[in-house]
Image (cartoon, helix red, strand yellow):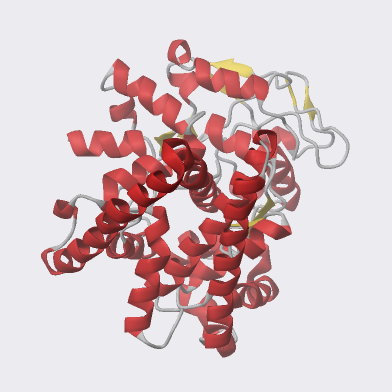
Amino acid sequence: MACRLADSMFLFMAPHQRPVGSQKLACLHSPGISQLKLENIVKKGIQHKKCSIPIRRGKFIQAVAIPVAPSSADSDSAEYRKQLAESYGFKQIGEPIPDNVTLRDVIDTLPKKVFEIDDVKAWKSVLISATSYALGLFLISKAPWYLLPLAWAWTGTAVTGFFVIGHDCAHKSFSKSKLVEDIVGTLAFLPLIYPYEPWRFKHDRHHAKTNMLAEDTAWHPVWKEEFDSSPLLRKAIIYGYGPFRPWMSIAHWLMWHFDVKKFRPNEVKRVKISLACVFAFMAIGWPLIIFKTGIMGWIKYWLMPWLGYHFWMSTFTMVHHTAPHIPFKSSNEWNAAQAQLNGTVHCDYPSWIEILCHDINVHIPHHISSRIPSYNLRAAHKSIQENWGKYLNEASWNWRLMKTIMTVCHVYDKEQNYVAFDQLAPEDSRPIKFLKSTMPDYA
């Protein structure tokens, strides 16, 4: 039980909830819970006599809608989905997938070439990451103090590229040689202090059970029982899933990857080898950095880029699988095509981030088949758009999207997907109210 509570406190990605209104969203109150009847949104004009969502020019939205289960007619309505997308910060919210569509149906529509491993492209990605990381360290060494945040942002993003390379190795989509993949994956993860094999074992289960309640090892929803179990834990959860959410992968990293007891007996030997590599890197690398540059040098050259990496690790994962309309399902209700195609989000980021992170955010094809190398994800996504485009959830990274996730997607609820913290415990939810009042509403 303690482990489950800790996991809930640390894992930052929850599934579905009802978003909370921003300052300009006036809502009806029903017994203790604010509700926005989304079916009213789709009627002409976005205004209702008791509830309104003012829209600024173009894509700028001034409210987060609160998800209420729509009627089947509404959920099939293009206008309904359009208004929902705008209120959440999405470009498109996909139609529900027909029950008879399987994951194999989707895979069979992909061109065979997207599964092909190309050694030149694979090693080109290594060169890009090594070069951009070296450039980042150079910029850190030369930047005046007021430009250091920019140098750290670049270097943290560059080192995220190492994670993506190790990620491809773990999925056996980097090289035709398993030995090469194990070596490259282990080395790529070392600067991040990530043990390669423990991460690989856990991540494989994430793909097998994406957005499945309890079984998904990437992120879990917060359970109401845990939220109510202790005032101290509740406050920790509120901060973790609220303002600290873009760094909660640090807690996930600590909780999931260093405890040998969390792995199957046949995995333990490889887990111990990976842990030995990580501890050796720390025992040798960190003292060398400190010897050459001092404690402040360790903070400057390693810790700050590492925090930058975890910002992207948390943010990418959070955006990939968390939205008020994307449900976590129990194992008996779970459907692979729903979870992987319709429950995974494609998000466009600025080009320099996409390049340094090797297109990891072209994420839907990766969940359709993890055997697709990162350098083929865009071609695969194009094919999926052509054949299955109306079912896709798509966004461009924006403040509204982040605000929706951080202030709405909190405690699991079977009917609403999520209930926000400030609806369940308003007296403890000052961090969430602070985010609502300070985070921009721009989509």
Q: Is residue 348 above or below residue 53?
A: below
Q: Can you see residue 101?
A: no
Pick whichever, 381 or 119, lies toward us. 119
Exactly how many numbered labels are in the figure?
0
Q: Position of residue 78 (x, y in %)?
A: 73, 53
Q: Can you see residue 115?
A: yes
Q: Name the residue located 58 percent from the left edge and 16 percent from the top edge.
A: 29
Pick whichever, 73 or 215, lies toward us. 215
Locate the C terminus and report the quarter of the image it occupies: top right
Q: Position of residue 434 (x, y in %)?
A: 58, 18
Q: Is residue 150 above or below residue 229?
A: below
Q: Name the residue located 68 percent from the left edge and 54 percent from the top edge.
A: 349
Q: Position of residue 197 (x, y in %)?
A: 28, 65
- Left or right of 262 in this view: 306: right
- Left or right of 211 in this view: 19: right
Q: Which residue is the extreme one toward the top? A: 427
Pick whichever, 179 or 292, lies toward us. 292
Q: Position of residue 323 (x, y in %)?
A: 55, 44
Q: Is residue 288 above or below residue 171?
A: above
Q: Name the residue located 43 percent from the left edge and 25 percent from the top edge.
A: 238
Locate the N terminus and report the quarter of the image it occupies: top left
Q: Is residue 143 above or below residue 261?
A: above
